Image: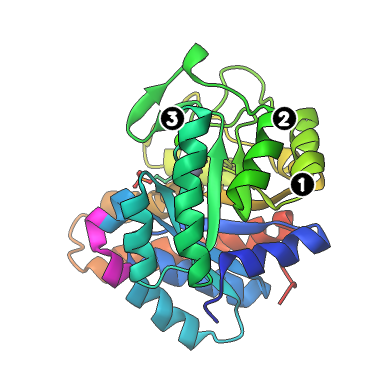
Amino acid sequence: MLISGAKLLRKAHDSGYAVGAFNFNNMEIAQAIFEAANEAASPIIVQCSEGAIKYAGADMLYAITKTLSEKYPHIPVALNLDHGTSFESCVNAIAHGFTSVMIDASHHNFDENLAITKEVVRVAHSVGVGVEAELGRLMGIEDNIVVEGKNASLVDPAEAEKFVKESGVDYLAPAIGTSHGAFKFKGEPKLEFELLKEVKRRTGVPLVLHGASSIPDEVRASFEQTGGDLKGSKGVPANFLEEAIKGGINKVNTDTDLRIAFMAQVRKVVKESPSEIDPRNYFKPARAAVTAMLIARMKVLGSAGKI
Ligand code: TD4
Ligand code: CA
Ligand code: ZN
């Protein structure tokens, strides 16, 4: 059933587990996410970036989600706009039936971020839609801007407390050292767990971890088996996720792991069956690989069995 992100995450917050928020741009990946949720008996968040909306259309992405949510009526699911960059973008998603929106005004200063977020909250709450905001800046590619070194910044707990109180936001993404994509850490993985706990203590809302892909060894190996190159890639290890969930994370954003698992199988067919022309014979194994990877991930997050 398609429900508000606020309701879904409040439950995770109250019971101390995290729900995976998985990005999709097409039918096959959406099917893989729902199939995994069904097998693992897990609630899910499916989410679309502005890039996904540009690629497939908000109407199409909503229709896919709605159709799948009706096929699996027992699965609690929220449809989230991921990294909405403006008030208009969030309103557009809400108008298309999204049940959660992220307003990412983290590249603005605190007061501007707060003002834009407040406006989104006002509209979203009037129709029962949950709102996520971000404080601090993630390293990596953000809004097509490369954020590096001193441009990346961690969340400030005092600011987080003020921000949540004044904006009325339902869940917050605090920057605690992750980044988007396959190359998250130069040396050993490192997250600011103490900072996370402090933000949780001061805000008391569900918290969101962006850039949370793990790039499991078997997924990396399947991609590299066909000559794919992910050298130097490093994700957030499963035990880090477990610790982050203990520290108050309730929404774990994951896109890169799905991309790699999916494309590894497409690459395999390209390599092994040079005469294959039927797209279904590329996408069927790719979809199955994403489902298998996600079932394992739902167990790590603690959402498996929570339906
Ligand atoms: O918010 N996300 C997903 C980002 C999706 C970007 O989509 P476009 O290419 O369409 O802009 C995450 O936090 C996922 O992080 P991950 O660790 O999976 O990269
Ligand atoms: Ca941001
Ligand atoms: Zn993100």
Would residue 114 be visible to someone looking at this image? yes
Label 2 to label 3, Cα distance in Å?
18 Å
Distance from mark 1 CB to nearest ligand 1 atom below 8 Å:
no
> Which mark is first along the chain, 2 or 1?
2
Compared to 271, does 19 lie above or below?
below
Image quadrant where one finds the N terminus: bottom right
The structure residue drawn at horizontal position 33% and vertical position 65%, both measured from the top left corner, is: 283
Image-based side of 2 in relation to 159, left or right:
left
Image quadrant where one finds the C terminus: bottom right
Which residue, given by chain and number where applicable, does mark 3 sit on?
Answer: 107
Which residue, given by chain and number where applicable, does mark 1 sit on?
Answer: 248
Amino acid at dot 2 = Ala
Please tell me the numbered disc located at residue 158.
2
Nearest to viewer (mark 1 / mark 2): 2
Amino acid at dot 1 = Gly
In reply to whether residue 56 is colored magenta, the answer given is yes
